[in-house]
Amino acid sequence: MNSETLFSNIKKKKSYLCIGLDSAIEKIPSCLSTSKRVVFDFNKEIVDATAQYAVAYKPNLAFYESRGVKGWSELELTVDYIKSNHPDIFLIADAKRGDIGNTSAMYAKAFFETMKFDAVTVAPYMGKDSVQPFLSFTDKYVIILALTSNQSAADFQYFSSKKNKPLFSEVIDVSKKWGNKDNTMYVVGATKASMLALIRQQIPDHFLLVPGIGVQGGDLNEVSEYGINKQCGLLINASRSVIFAGNQKDFAVKAAEEAKNIQSEMEKILTIKGLL
Amino acid sequence: MNSETLFSNIKKKKSYLCIGLDSAIEKIPSCLSTSKRVVFDFNKEIVDATAQYAVAYKPNLAFYESRGVKGWSELELTVDYIKSNHPDIFLIADAKRGDIGNTSAMYAKAFFETMKFDAVTVAPYMGKDSVQPFLSFTDKYVIILALTSNQSAADFQYFSSKKNKPLFSEVIDVSKKWGNKDNTMYVVGATKASMLALIRQQIPDHFLLVPGIGVQGGDLNEVSEYGINKQCGLLINASRSVIFAGNQKDFAVKAAEEAKNIQSEMEKILTIKGLL
């Protein structure tokens, strides 16, 4: 998928919502507890109920790996299900990988060939050769961590040069030359909305993946005000606030209501911005 | 395992060799090709043949994930086999994870509970709360990327502050306060031996995991000269040069010869340094 197709899907669904499948097994409604594939069954119901309101899903790898082979197996089922039944969905592996070249090539193979993800999140600490193997795949995206939504993001991401340039800004300036807006996106936390205007000056055309809406406290309107570009250019992620909106038999209905609420807000914003 | 036990194993084996299980399936000798668990069988033979010369093994997660569920399953078999049959081995998940707190906690669970690794490598870009969940486990280590061995390490790890302090140095100074020498190590590439003297001033007591010996061109004597401390303080990794030393039926014998060569060099160095 490239940015044009993604923007087309955003216009079709009037939404730039990404739903994070942080499907912690201990939080899954007890009505599913007799299932042998409880996480997959949960994801399937959540996706089927919410896909009309979302353009992207983002399984968080840690929640699958924590269960070992069983978790990895249910991740693969989830990926296959979404790709087969909702082919317009942009599917992100939130994996935060990154290693020397020959190793990153193996991670790229894991997420783009063995599993059919459209994108994978990557930590930039090891530089260009840790990112480049992901860029050699056609119609796939690498999503580079720039400014994250956690409290300790400030520990190193604001580490500043002689010219008062923070590390996250250096990461963007250097890495934007490795690829282009059709194979590179950036993670920018919603809790740092005031920084978005600065980041948009550096990368006016790239898509940004914005976590931190919902439980983490980010503000949709503020992020959209600073972050939207002419192709929308935003994928705003909500995880727990959507997928665990309910914990009874109607959990998927509750998730859909929450997703629809966010989609409605997004539709208003897209209309005001003249993008629909 | 803590630093005292690790040093005791180093003295017993007269070795501070870590063998990287970068077990790329396409490089595994064809004599194993009829096996249903080719990577596990390869790892088992390599480990049994080389364990007398090594104190640590380091499966590189990418090479397992690239094969999906099957690869993950053979990784678990490998971990179980090593822990059951070679209980003195220090077992490192070279995973380079790191995410917001609740997600890092899930990664810690994956590597320290679901699998019984002793340590996991972590990228520091997201700061303290991405590392801390790994530190809450007793007798386990987090191994933080400081200065890596790849060419592009310079892209961001040398990004310098007003006072000419490079990022990798800031990462060490800040993160060494989060834990101690019994739960934290650092990755320092062997290709940057000249930097080891500086790093040793910052963290005289911590163990360093040093990749880059062998195929990547690092020098064992030079690294040891700058890096050894009173508990040895080094785990020097060799991967491809050991595990793929042979590609015929005697591949494990060839791997053992290569491991023994490195161990012999290490024994000389430990003797000169007065640590045996």
Image (tube, coloured by chain):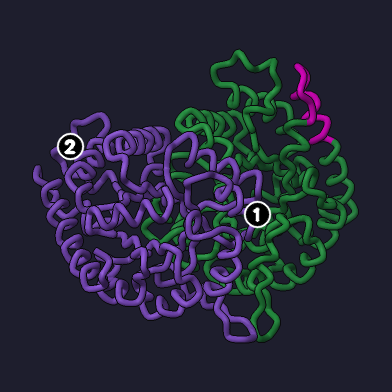
Chain colours: A green, B purple
Subunit that carries the residue with mark 1: B
Return the residue nearer the eye: A259 or B20: B20
Q: Quadrant of residue B80?
A: top left
**What is the distance, in whole Å, between disc 1 and disc 2 at their CAs?**
43 Å
- Residue A6 lies, with reference to residue B209, above or below; the image says above
Q: Which residue has dot 1 on it?
A: B129
Which quarter shows the C terminus of chain B?
bottom left
Subunit that carries the residue with mark 2: B
Q: Secondary structure at mark 1?
A: helix
- Number of numbered discs present? 2
Question: In the image, are marks 1 and 2 on the same chain?
Answer: yes
Give the magenta-colored segment's residue range.
Answer: A245-260
Return the residue nearer the eye: A5 or A104: A104
Look at the image and say whether residue B90 sits in the magenta stretch: no
Q: Secondary structure at mark 2?
A: helix
Q: Position of residue B156 (x, y in %)?
A: 54, 73
- Residue B215 lies, with reference to residue B133, above or below; the image says below
1 vs 2, front mark: 1
Q: Position of residue B38 (x, y in %)?
A: 25, 36
Q: Amino acid at mark 1?
A: Asp
Q: Position of residue B221 (x, y in %)?
A: 25, 74
Would you call the spot at circle 2 few (<14 residues within 10 Å), some (14-19), or many (20 or more)?
some
Return the residue nearer the eye: B236 or B239: B236
Horizontal arrangement in the rendering, residue A213 relative to residue A24 (left or right): right
Q: Amino acid at mark 2?
A: Leu
Which mark, by number, is residue B32?
Answer: 2
